[in-house]
Amino acid sequence: MKYCTKCKKIYTDTDRTACVLCGRELISNPNQYSPVDIVTANGFELERIKSALTEESIPFSVRECRDDTGLQILNAAPPENSCISVPLGYYTQTMELLIGIGALQEADELSEEDEKKLQEERTATKQELSPRKSFWIKVLSILLFIGLIAATVFLADIIGRFINPNFYK
């Protein structure tokens, strides 16, 4: 069994060396307390899974999925999708429970074609922006932001002098 520390995903394929989703190197012997993302759910389904896990005394944590965070801050609404994680030691018991209640279907491995598509997307993303270019873009963005703030303050000062010239004497 191998584990991706970034995606919190388990791989049963022992020949695999990198995560399909993020490309990070997999570790071979994860700690039994390492969090594993089991399922993403919302609404009634989320509450149903939480109550089933609580009833079976399986420790779990619920967090907002990364993609939804910005919208939640703006809308102050409950999360659209929440990721449920359990410790690795409870992985098998949790999977059996979720399959038993119909929250999950039997796990299917990714087909070779899907795996190739994910790999191509990941390499295309890496080729679009190298770390060096990304660094310089961030530096340039920070400098432009500081310049924008300075220009705003300078412009406000000019407008203030125009409106009330005696105030600045």
Image (cartoon, rainbow, N blue to C red):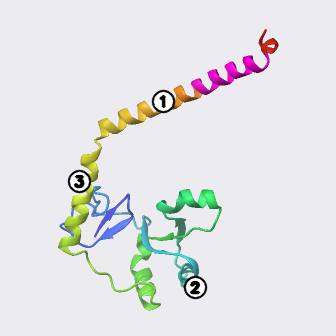
Segment colored magenta: 151-164
> Residue 22: x, y in percent?
31, 58
- Whether residue 156 sits left or right of residue 135 in the image: it is right
Q: Secondary structure at mark 2?
A: helix
Circle 3 residues within 10 Å: few <14, some 14–19, many ≥20: few
Name the amino acid, label 3. Answer: Thr
Circle 1 residues within 10 Å: few <14, some 14–19, many ≥20: few
137 lies above or below 61: above
Q: Which residue is the site of mark 2? A: 55
Quarter placement of the N terminus: bottom left
Q: Secondary structure at mark 3?
A: helix
Q: Which residue is the site of mark 1? A: 144
**Label 1 close to label 2 by CB (< 8 Å):** no
Residue at (44%, 91%) from the top-left corner?
100
For marks 1 and 2, give the CA distance. Answer: 54 Å
Name the amino acid, label 2. Answer: Glu
Name the amino acid, label 1. Answer: Leu
Quarter placement of the C terminus: top right
Q: Secondary structure at mark 1?
A: helix
Magenta region includes residue 98: no
Kindly identify which numbered label has been placed on residue 123. Answer: 3
Residue lying farthest right? 166
Q: Nearer the viewer, mark 3 or mark 2?
A: 3
Residue at (69%, 20%) from the top-left corner?
157
The chief SS type of the magenta part is helix
- Whether residue 61 sits left or right of residue 156 in the image: it is left
Location of residue 77 by image quarter: bottom right
- Whether residue 74 sits left or right of residue 18 in the image: it is right
Q: Nearer the viewer, mark 1 or mark 3?
A: 1
